[in-house]
Image (spheres, rainbow, N blue to C red):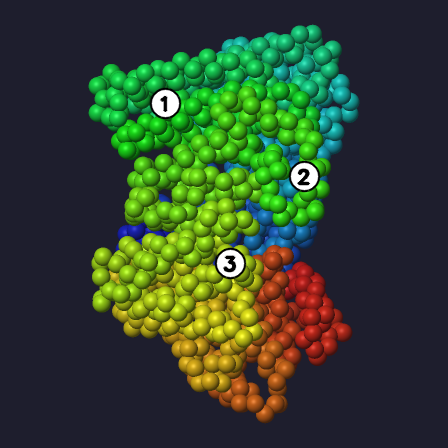
Amino acid sequence: MDAQQLSQVESLCETLYVGTPTTGENGETIERAEAQSRLLSLQSSADYIPQCQYILDHSTSPSQYARLVASNSLTQLVTSHWNNFTVPQRIDIRNYVLAYIANQGPGLQDYVTMSLIKLVCRITKLGWFDDKTHRELADDVTKFLQATVDHCILGLKILNQLVDELNIPNTGRTLTQHRKTSVSFRDVCLFKVFQLGLTTLKQLQTRAIVADQAQEQSLGEQALRLTVKCLNFDFIGTNPDESSEDVGTIQAPTSWRSVLQDPSTIELFFELYKNTSPPRSSKAMEAIILLCSVRRSLFPTDKDRAAHLGRAMTGIRSLLSNQTGFQHQDNYHQFCRLLGRLKANYQLSELVKADGYLEWLELASGFTVQSIRNWQYCTNSIHYLLALWGRLVAAVPYVRPDTGVSGHAELLEKQVLTIVEAYIESMLGSVELIYDEGMDDPLEDDGSLREQLDRLPVICRFKYSEVANLILNKFDPLLNQYRQALSHIGSSSTENAPADVSRQICIIEGQLTWLTYMIGAIVGGHSWSSAHLGDGDETIDSSLSRRALQLAQCVDYRLTQSNGVGRADLKLELAILYYFQNFRRVYMFMWDQISNPASASSSSSVVSMMASKLDSVPSAKQKVYQRMFEHLGMGDHTAVANLIVTKVGNNLKFLPEEVEVVQQTLNLLLDMANGYSSSKLMLTLDTVKFLARHHTEDHFSFLAVPANVRYRTTFHATLARLLMSPTGSEKLGLTFEQFVEPIMNTLKQLGSLPDLRNEAARRPLIGAFRDLRGVTSSLHNRKSYALLFDVMYPNYLPLLAKVAEAWHDQSDVIISLLRFLQEFCHNKANRVNFDQSSPNGILLFRATSDVVSAYGRRLVAAPRPDGDIYKQRYKGMALSLSVLNSALSGNYVCFGVFTLYNDQCLDNALDVALQMILSVPMEDVFAYPKLSKSYFGFIEIFFRNHIKSVLALDTGLLMQLMNSVHEGVQDSDPQLSSLCANAIDHLATFYFENMGKDKIEVHNLNNHLSAQPNLFSSLTSTLFNLLLFGAPLPQHHWTVIKPMLSLMLASESSFTSYKDHLVSTQSPENQQALNNAFNKLLSDVQRSLDSANRERFTQKLISFRVAVRGFLTI
């Protein structure tokens, strides 16, 4: 590279990062995309390493983008071509980069510095076992720390990146290789790095480092980050989730003991927290959290562990007493995490023995109460505090009363009640504040709300009676006020009421919403374990539930009496549904066990009679269940279930436009139908019978709302599930034919239209297909599926193809049709299973073929749309291919019949499917995951079950398919690569097993191979390159190497050619090792494709890959 070329590179870099067009060598204008393409060529070969070095040494661009590109390219080249370098070359590159950072680093931009640091750390990781020089990076960095302040900052950045690099797995290396390097780094260097970070912090604290304010802040940040990363290191290979804030136990090695249990260590971080501001102070708090999470066995004795806990609690008490740093959001959040983590790592029996525990408990309680009262500033942190108190009270039964300081149990009870009372008061008080000042409503932050509700049951049930009284003392007056306020406005809506009344109702509804959520969470926390069955908590559950159910009745009465005009706040409706879900889960699973055996059918079996006698003496659970409903005072379980289902029906009837309410209501109904006991209970309810008989838009207007169209499927799936349960038809007094009659009537009316492409038919078509899809999804056996098929054929199946023909360009209609057909053709649980003499399987495929052919031909003939191509073209294509895949692989059609009787429906479907997939550019295939799965799914089935049709194609078409397979097998998605690998295996297996036979398909394949003699060799080369040079093979990715044996047997010359070529590219010392590895691979391999031989060869391939990748060069 010369100065002119360097100038061109700098211009391209400016274009790439700034966007300013530049001029090429021939005067052409170069835009950003072209600049990126040209610059990426620097990463294409190891031959470009000198050019990258030249750029680093000679670039003078002020922006330094050229140096960034050179550094990034070097990192990529070193990673990709690592085996191409000798050990001395690797050390030379490492020393060059390290010296460059030392000499140029202080004057470089941060992004260039970090890129170079990443490069030297990557070299260190890859060469860790090559030479001890790589393992001495921490010692080399010590020289940085002893030089200028700027060099000290650079040294800390290098150490930070080194810990990250050695801790986080890289693509291109197996997890085993990563762990081997990581463990060695842990044992050799990590403790030294941690000590360097601590030493720097101590020097900063004692002012031993002379630096200006900015440098001091940077040093502090880097040193704190380093210590946190060291403590967060994956010491034992658990690969924790980096996105989670939860800290597990820190499995620090025993050699760290002296530093971690040294009192000065944790005290250092407490001092740093007190004397700095974010982000340094929050990082110091993060380090304290990690120090409090160190494994128990690190401490030699319980006394040492207790001393460590005591120092932590002393520091926490000091911070709580002085409210140090809590005005900063980051500090506050980390401190809440610390409190939540403290109990997670220490037993309550240890905490109560610590000095100052009672003071700590009172201070923590005061902090929690203060936080709850200032909820608007700490919504995302409250759940950590609730977790602390939940863990404390959960451990109380396991601590003896005489353990630790006296009076700790009584104080905990007192503080818990104080916290719960503060929580209730604050959440209720927030409603008025939000209404008057327009603040963000925590009820609308679903994630934070659920976090809090998940932690409430344990805390509230600790002193359940007292907490329940707190709630009831708030709930009863509010409910009375609510009823009185509603009596003033009659059937009017809240918005049309006088301003003061409207405000009162809104505030009361908001407060009732909070209380209902709390009751739902607490009732949902009921434990059916034997240890808690005698506590009598079910009577308190019943008291709370009575209020929630009365509120639901009140809201429902207003809704029905006003014909949907008088609506409660939607958040209250959602809270009621949340309560119903929890109540259903806890108290609606035993209905069949409590029901009177005498009401059973007289035709009960002997086994049933014996079971009823055994059940005549109620179990402990049954007694609890009965007491619950006796104390509830609202009737038995049937009455309560009827109340819930009636509310469900009224929501669907009167709240059709409220999509979230409709969704949650239908989810509740579906969950009740899915429960074994609750579904049997539902079949006895008049409301359910009404739903099953009147599931039309005339009775439930939500079905007519376009935004609810997807919920039609859920609604009908639920009803069909109830109907198809063992006694469903009998209990509901409804046959399947009667149930689907409204849908069939709609299809009949649509079929009689002279012009099916009528705008008035759009919504009925979509609704009918959505409904049918829901019904079909609930048919799980042969008998129930046959009921639907008998209804659909012959009157309605032909209509499907007409709809596809008429509405092919309207995505909403065609998608609903194809989704129904996809479900209808899916042979799940072998439900599509007709008698041997039945033609229904053939008729079903013929109807499917007609739909796919009608839609596919129009789709292929249509021009490429200008708008959203996925919605207008590829979504329908993906679904139609998926429909055909289900039909072709459903195992309910003998496809040979079509050729035998000259029926063209199979050929038509395959021809249209081929036209569709060949019309899609490969970049579009991989751009849309659903399309790619259907696309390659069809190709795999085509090669598996219809190889004769595959080989009958023109050579050009077959090569297009093979090119797609060739690209697909290299995709990173294991599902796609597996499908393509299977397709290759089907073709190679057919050729091997039929080689030399006088069959027309074999002759066709030979003709294709004569026209494209490199077909098998290119596939062999690609698969072996993936094996040897690709990313690490996950366990589920082994199928990519499945076709290798069949390919080798089908074309031994292709394998020999690849082997010879690969050996020729290696150095003389590697050639012998590679030949030995190949000989070992081929030993004991038989010329057979039976499963045992395949499995044996697959295992040998994996071993071959591991052995060869250690020395192979690209």
Quadrant (top left, top right, bottom left, bottom right) of the C terminus: bottom right
Q: Secondary structure at mark 3?
A: helix
> Disc 3 to disc 1, how far (Cα)?
46 Å
Q: Say which mark, if any, is on residue 784.
A: 3
Query: How many numbered circles are shown?
Result: 3
233, 202: nearer the viewer: 233
Q: Say which mark, if any, is on residue 755.
A: none
Q: Is residue 860 left or right of residue 1013?
A: left
- The x and y percentages for residue 842 are 47, 74
Q: Is residue 156 left or right of residue 705?
A: right
Q: Residue at x 57, y 17 (%)?
A: 464
Q: Which residue is mark 1?
A: 510
645, 178: nearer the viewer: 645
Q: Name the kind of residue labelled 3 in the image.
A: Ser
Q: Quadrant of residue 305?
A: top right
- The x and y percentages for residue 600 are 60, 42
Q: Say which mark, if any, is on residue 612.
A: 2
Q: Residue at x 34, y 71 (%)?
A: 854
Q: Using the image, determine if residue 715 lies above or below residue 829.
A: above
Q: Secondary structure at mark 1?
A: helix
Disc 2 versus disc 1: nearer the observer: 2
